Amino acid sequence: MILAKFEQIKQYICQQVELGHLKEHDRVPSENALSEQFVCSRMTARRAITELCDTGLLVRSQGRGTFVATLKSQTSLMEIRNISDEIRERGHDYSVEVINLKEVNATQDVAITLDVEKDTTIYCSTLVHLEDNVPVQLEVRYVNPRLVPEYLSNDFTLHTPHEFLSMAAPLTEAEHIIEAIMPTSLIAKQLKLAQFEPCLQIKRRTFSSKGVVSFATLTHPSSRFRIGGRFSVNG
Amino acid sequence: MILAKFEQIKQYICQQVELGHLKEHDRVPSENALSEQFVCSRMTARRAITELCDTGLLVRSQGRGTFVATLKSQTSLMEIRNISDEIRERGHDYSVEVINLKEVNATQDVAITLDVEKDTTIYCSTLVHLEDNVPVQLEVRYVNPRLVPEYLSNDFTLHTPHEFLSMAAPLTEAEHIIEAIMPTSLIAKQLKLAQFEPCLQIKRRTFSSKGVVSFATLTHPSSRFRIGGRFSVNG
DNA sequence: CATAGCCACTTGTATATACAAGTGGCGCTG
DNA sequence: CAGCGCCACTTGTATATACAAGTGGCTATG
């Protein structure tokens, strides 16, 4: 048995929803029905459903049954998404311009942020992400070489830093600070801004189970990029 | 039995953490130990622990045991917090300046946003929130009068719009767009900005179970306010 | 015809049990 | 003393069962 039974049942229900066989507010088979269908006990079927309720795909109602929830668009505010995927999902062209890749000595503040010793050699990548050949994000990223020693050998035209890091050291947590700034002339030049305009700047620290993986400063020209999201309020 | 047994166990463990008897990375009693202590089956104790893991209070490790997780500060990025609470929690003075309260005819776009008929009369409040007498947020808010007819009768020096709306129509969902803008001269004046500086602008739509409650535009001078948050990445 | 009550079906809680699988310590052996 | 293997303990998966409790429809009764 490769996959646990309750995982198989989860997968099946997810597929039914993805394929459109189950739509919003449709009733899903009862726990008893599923346990017959998958030849398992009711508790196993129940577990599958419980976990899908936790993710928000299903909602239960005692006495009535279990139903497909109102499907909500994902909250890209919270989610850390890969910018190339996001651009491609909008049906646009993604490309990247690598400005430089280097090793640098950690200054005091970067060392603290990355949780390494001062003057350690750390990796730094600077690149610009383009949507239909228009720069939409300047990404300056410092990476902890202890956790991802092979970072600089990545081909960034094939894998974004986020993609590469996700493979090398799966993300467990992230920390964000969002600010509005006026770009410096260097940033304006790198983003090919015709005139100065306010930019959204996100400082993001990402963690894996082994510690701080990287620290990135993501700068978006306001006229070309927004951040949005929808989420439900708990409690 | 007022509370289900697994809820009692959850409560007990939460208390132990709150009281400091269990600290970060401490080991919590094993499922078997809990089931003896509470005279229940292991599956019941297990359920309590499972749900506390889901909330992030505990982490499990097969073969080793269950531990109190690294306690994280709340993510104020996702949470919709009351600005007056936030300012007071920082130990600063909160005050508010009401610029105006009025009824307006819904223009096309506001009508769509609030999901009401065009030219309906809707409520509009404009106020500035101050931290130690410095303006930190300009809030322009449109409210659906069908859902909160008594909105304009609120004393905004006692309750922020968010507080009042939360009582009148509990939030179920919210939608956000974040942008960086240069303030108009009116906004700059209302925020008492000495010179023009980039501002973070959040457009927020809030929903109750009965529909769109309000639409707010929150403008923060970048030099006086940031948005931050930390969260765990699922999957 | 209206309704009160019963019944079938659903989810919710709880138990007892079994075996799989991961971890870490302890002791035995080379 | 180093390392291997066993064992105790832990969490992970799964089953079979029981009763509680909420929902909705159907039927019998007034």
Image (cartoon, coloured by chain):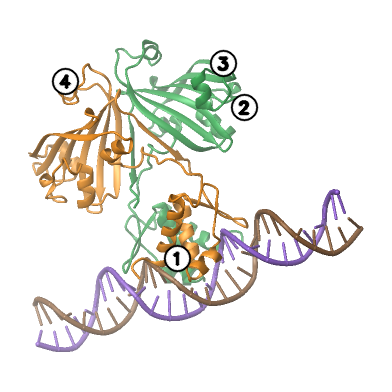
Chain colours: A orange, B green, C purple, D brown
Q: Is residue A215 visible?
A: yes
Looking at the image, do the residues carrying marks 4 and 1 touch, with CB atoms under 8 Å apart?
A: no
Give the mark, 3 or 2, whose residue is nearer the N terminus.
3
Q: How far across and how far down the image is residue A198, in percent?
A: 28, 21
Instruction: Give, as a three-letter code, the residue at label 1.
Output: Arg
Snapshot quadrant of residue C11: bottom right
The residue beneath circle 2 is B146
For mark 4, give the secondary structure. Answer: helix
Instruction: Give, as a three-letter code, the residue at label 4.
Output: Ser
Of all chains, the one bearing label 4 is A
Of all chains, the one bearing label 1 is B
Looking at the image, do the residues carrying marks 3 and 2 touch, with CB atoms under 8 Å apart?
A: no
Of all chains, the one bearing label 3 is B
Looking at the image, do the residues carrying marks 1 and 2 touch, with CB atoms under 8 Å apart?
A: no
Of all chains, the one bearing label 2 is B
A71 and C28: which is toward the camera: A71
Answer above or below: position of A85 versus B25: above
Q: CA distance from mark 3 to mark 2?
A: 14 Å
The residue beneath circle 3 is B105
The residue beneath circle 4 is A185
Give the mark, 1 or 3, whose residue is nearer the N terminus.
1
Q: Are marks 3 and 4 on the same chain?
A: no
Snapshot quadrant of residue B5: bottom right
Q: How far across and how far down the image is residue A210, in percent?
A: 22, 53
Answer above or below: position of A9 versus B140: below
Snapshot quadrant of residue A105: top left
The residue beneath circle 1 is B46
Q: Are marks 4 and 2 on the same chain?
A: no
Q: CA distance from mark 4 to mark 1?
A: 58 Å
Q: Are marks 4 and 1 on the same chain?
A: no
Instruction: Give, as a three-letter code, the residue at label 3.
Output: Asn
Q: CA distance from mark 1 to mark 3?
A: 56 Å
